[in-house]
Amino acid sequence: MVEPILSDLPFLKHVFVLDGDARGHVDFKRTISNQSDLFSVNGNATGDTCCDDVAFWLYSSGSTGMPKGVPHVHTSLAETARLFGRGVLGIQKDDVVFSAAKFFFAYGLGNALSFPMSVGATTILWTTRPTPETVFATLKQHQPTIFYGVPTLYAAMLAYPNCGPGISSEKLRLCVSAGEALPKEVGVRWQKMFNVDIIDGVGSTELLHIFLSNHPEDIVYGSSGKAVPEYDLRLVNEQGQEVTGDEIGELLVRGASSAIGYWNQREKSRTTFEGEWTRTGDKYTRDTAGYYYYCGRTDDMFKVSGIWVSPFEVESALIAHDAVLEAAVVGYEDEDGLTKPRAFVVLKGVQHDDRLFEELKDWVKEKVGKWKYPRQIVFVDDLPKTATGKIQRFKLKEPDNIWLTDS
């Protein structure tokens, strides 16, 4: 597949072939088998590094477009393990952890590598694609104490035909969700089904892991909780001023695990990393008790009749309906050039018709307000997602939207 383009890559030095005939390239297994078991840098057993040296790169998930390269320094992994792994989750040596999110995802890297490694806990490494069937089988077989998932996976597991208390780990003490905000309905149903809470938090590749979260002793389903200790948060308007009351603002975060910028994207680095503060691109409100409530990505927010509409709020209302498995809401222009909500809905195996269409519209009106209901509802078999399970709403706004053909 890649052979025809190799001659067009002037900086490429080697191609490793994992299986089969290397055909003049480097045979990966043979090369690895010829290496020493001892690690050496320039003939020494250790490398000369400092806390601010770049240690690794991660790529953002691509939920809003092309992924961006994000370099992190050596101390970043240790900081997230200390602040969230031990500080919030209380991970200990006798814990067994299972993360459906893989290593290439900042969330999965902390869950399954740096957090358990920081205390000597056991981690379950798992290569299978996360489906309700395979995840439940792994939970049952290995009996982890901590499970990490994403909202779309938790919703799919609750909709699994055989879902019930006996299908999961009997040793689970805590579940964690990140990647996107967890709808209140999903968190409440999970807690009732398995008698285990889901700690919903918000993180980013730029901050390496979760910096805003609920706490095992302080859970408010439907909220993203409060700042993880030693992270500072701000909500600002479009002019960069702090918002007051229940105003919607963009979330900015300051903390020790912030990345140094984006690789080869100088302009984007300047607009995202503002001194000590990092712009998250997420819109939030904050109540008088200090809990943060997710509204949507900055690029996904839109106004109807001059009033901001939170896509997440409408999506959460739709998901609360018994017939709905997943939902994504975007703005579109009607024949008068006015912006209105359009919902893409995945059903739980039921057939859609005009009756269900009207029922869902009325349901949203009752739950979140009459002006927020979706004027169009498109029933689809699935939604576009990144490899980390985030819904790619920007694809649902494209002019040649292939998902519209399934309505």
Image: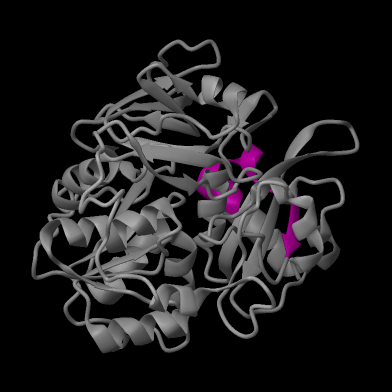
Residue 109: within the magenta? no
319 with respect to 46 (left or right): right
- Which colouring convention does the figure follow? one colour
Q: Quadrant of the N terminus?
A: bottom right
Position of residue 167 measured from the top left corner of the image (x, y, whole percent): 32, 87
Position of residue 263 measured from the top left corner of the image (x, y, whole percent): 54, 35
Q: Nearer the viewer, residue 369 or 261?
A: 261
Furthest toward the right, the residue is 335
Position of residue 203 measured from the top left corner of the image (x, y, whole percent): 38, 43
Q: Quadrant of the C terminus?
A: bottom right
Q: Nearer the viewer, residue 278 or 29?
A: 29
Numbered marks: total: 0
Q: Is residue 178 visible?
A: no
**Residue ID at (40%, 33%):** 259
Q: Nearer the viewer, residue 60 or 45?
A: 45
Q: Nearer the viewer, residue 44 or 158?
A: 44
Position of residue 181 measured from the top left corner of the image (x, y, whole percent): 44, 49
Magenta region: 364-379
**Residue ID at (63%, 52%):** 392
**Residue ID at (42%, 89%):** 162
266 with respect to 209 (left or right): right
94 with respect to 81 (left or right): left
Q: Is residue 314 visible?
A: yes
Q: Residue 299 appears in which quarter of the rendering?
A: top right
Q: Residue 184 appears in which quarter of the rendering?
A: bottom left
